Image (cartoon, grey):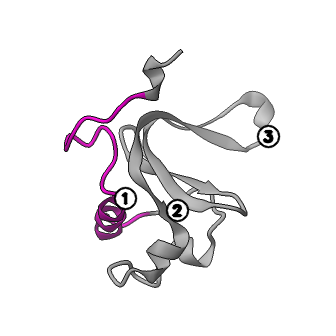
Amino acid sequence: MTLGDLCFFYHSGTKSRCVVGVVEVSREWYTDDDDEGEGSVDVKAIGEMRKCVDLKEMKGDKGISKGFVLFRQPRLSVVPVEEDVWKKICDLGNGFCGDGKEDCESSDDES
């Protein structure tokens, strides 16, 4: 993951496994002195998917390779996403807020 990369924000819980939004890498992998070798990547929110894309929906789509790593290990924190898979997931989710296709309502404006 490199600075500026777009990434899917994926819920990997037992009740709902789905892509819910897009984030951007704002700080590349780093470690804190007290992390004992474990690292982090910082991200910032870009926008929510217009429609959440469920893991079952992705698995059932013929346009996404059965070899997609997320299908074999759905609870991974980070998996590579090929460009064609990225486009297909975005299509399934009708894009994401911030993709330039249309404005989305922001929940940040509510108090």
Asked where in the image residue 13 lies, by quadrant, the reply is bottom right
- In primary-sequence order, the first of circles 1 and 2 is 2
Question: Which residue is disc 2 drawn over?
Answer: 79
Mark 3 or 1: in front is 1
Asked where in the image residue 104 lies, by quadrant, the reply is top left
Q: Amino acid at mark 1?
A: Gly
- Residue 93, image x, y percentages: 37, 58
- The range drawn in magenta is 81-106
The reply to whether callout 2 and callout 3 are in contact (CB within 8 Å) is: no
- In primary-sequence order, the first of circles 2 and 3 is 3
Q: Is residue 63 above or below residue 2?
A: below
- Residue 59, image x, y percentages: 48, 79
Residue extending farthest left: 101
Mark 2 or 3: in front is 2
Which residue is found at the position 38% from the left and 78% from the top?
A: 64
Q: Is residue 37 magenta?
A: no
Q: Is residue 97 magenta?
A: yes
Tell me the crowding category of disc 1: few under 14, some 14 to 19, or many 20 or more residues within 10 angstroms, Cα based: some
- Residue 18, image x, y percentages: 54, 60
- Residue 101, image x, y percentages: 19, 44
Mark 1 or 2: in front is 1
Question: Which residue is disc 1 drawn over?
Answer: 93
**On-image quarter of the C terminus:** top right
Q: Amino acid at mark 2?
A: Val
